[in-house]
Image: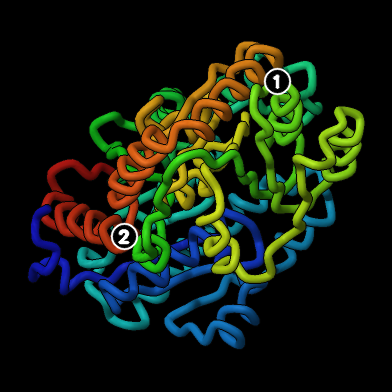
Amino acid sequence: MRSVITQESRGLTILLVAPNVSEQMGGEAIKALQIFQELRKLHPNTIQITHARNERELNDRLKLNNVYYVRDNWVALFLWNSVILRWFLNFWFCRRAVKLAEQIVDEQNLPADRVILHQTEPNSPVLPRIVSRKLVNVFGPINGDIHYPKAFRRHENLKDKLRRILHAPVQRINRVLFRGIAKADLVLLAGGERTRNSLLRAGCRPERMVSCIDCGVKDAILDRPRVQHLGENYRFIHFGRLVFQKGTFLIIESLRKTKHKVCLDIVGKGPELDHCQRLVRELGLENRVRFLGWYTNHAELLDSFKYYRGVVFPSFQDANGIVVQEAMAVGLPTICLDWGGPQLLIDNEKTGFLIEPLSKDYITDKMASCLDQLGQDGVLAENMSKLAREEAESWRWSNVMKEWMVLYAELRNGRNAHWTK
């Protein structure tokens, strides 16, 4: 890797923008918080701009400084109360955040050509973007254009169906009316070809897209001893919020097709909990499936991984898959669908198994076979574990931040060559 510690990178100010930066507001907010924390370790001259709803957590609980807040005005309240217009709240926030960024630059007398304005969230490719005409503009990692496989589309709710049907038309509208993404200096692309094609429809220039990982992994996780596998072990774990699209029911149904007494621990809660518990009773699997609820401490969940042979995560709407990343980081082979984020993370039959989402029966048949094979073959599990850990090393947040710093410095050097108003 090229050296990050250059005169160009030392002189930069990085302004990060994300509507939610929090440990309490879901995956995107957690990712935005980790980006801020990890980037500041490498480059202290980093400032975060976020919404005021995060102020109590960031200031009082996490004791973070260098954070500025966008506060609601009458426009935000009107959009929120109208319900039908809430979709435009993101556009409102982005506009206000960009103005606040420019205000910070003016108040601190920062040279505008040495400031990077990086909007890390939202990660959706379809939301309208606002750029600053004064600063270098970076977006991403952007991920998305992920919808239910055909085998499960009859289960789509109205919102998901409209999102899928209208995705391409909305991007063509963005290309004409909202050209922020087309004016970006750099777009970090995390969703592979599906997201690249979506952004191209919106007018994003291909030469300004750089592929990257959607989310990094904390050093504290990768510094843990790797889980080692010997002999037979038929214990598997599934963790995360229990919602339909995570596919928990598929794992339960696959257990009745295994040749061995594969056991499953389910960690998490959610609206699908009752259905999954009922399914276990109907299939007579009470002695093979345990519902453990949530771990109050994430470190305790990671500590428990040493007892398992692998992680099963048949989600069909995850654009990335932090569950998969953490499993691979500690050396647990994963069984997932060949769909969405996991298909970009797993090397099939080397770091885990990918199953085509052709039908429910096909998935459960293949999953049962994978569970039997992985549970029985300790050598296979150990080889997958080693390769998974090696792959996860490239996701280490500290390494990801170094790569971004190189990109920032290159943008500073080459801005005038390709930036157009």
Disc 2 from disc 1: Cα separation: 61 Å
How would you rate the neighbour count of disc 2 (Cα within 10 Å): few for under 14, some for 14-19, many for 20 or more?
some
Tell me the element at label 2: loop
Quadrant of the drawing holding the C terminus: top left
Q: In this view, does 415 lie above or below 182?
A: below
Residue 343, image x and y in percent?
A: 45, 29
In the rendered view, does 293 fall on the left or right side of 106? right
Residue 177 visible to an observer of this rendering:
no
| Frontmost residue, 148 versus 32 | 148
Q: Residue at x 75, y 40 (%)?
A: 288
Picture quarter containing residue 396? Answer: bottom left
Residue drawn at (65%, 66%) of the image: 24
Task: Please state which amino acid type lies under the numbered disc 2.
Answer: Lys
On the picture, is 371 further left or further right than 193? right
Identify the residue shown where x is 68% and y is 33%: 261
Q: What residue type is labelled 1?
A: Lys
Nearer the observer: mark 2 or 1; the answer is 1
Residue 367, picture quadrant = top right
Q: How crowded is mark 1: few (under 14 residues within 10 Å), some or many (20 or more)?
A: some
> Which residue is more in the foreground, 388 or 17?
388
Quadrant of the rendered structure where residue 165 is? top right
From the viewer's perspective, is residue 96 above or below residue 40?
A: above
Q: Give the mark count.
A: 2
Which numbered dot is residue 257? 1
In the displayed structure image, the side of residue 68 where residue 359 appears, left or right:
right
Question: Can residue 129 be seen at all in this image of the molecule?
Answer: yes
Name the residue carrying label 2. Answer: 134
State the residue lying farthest toward the front: 231
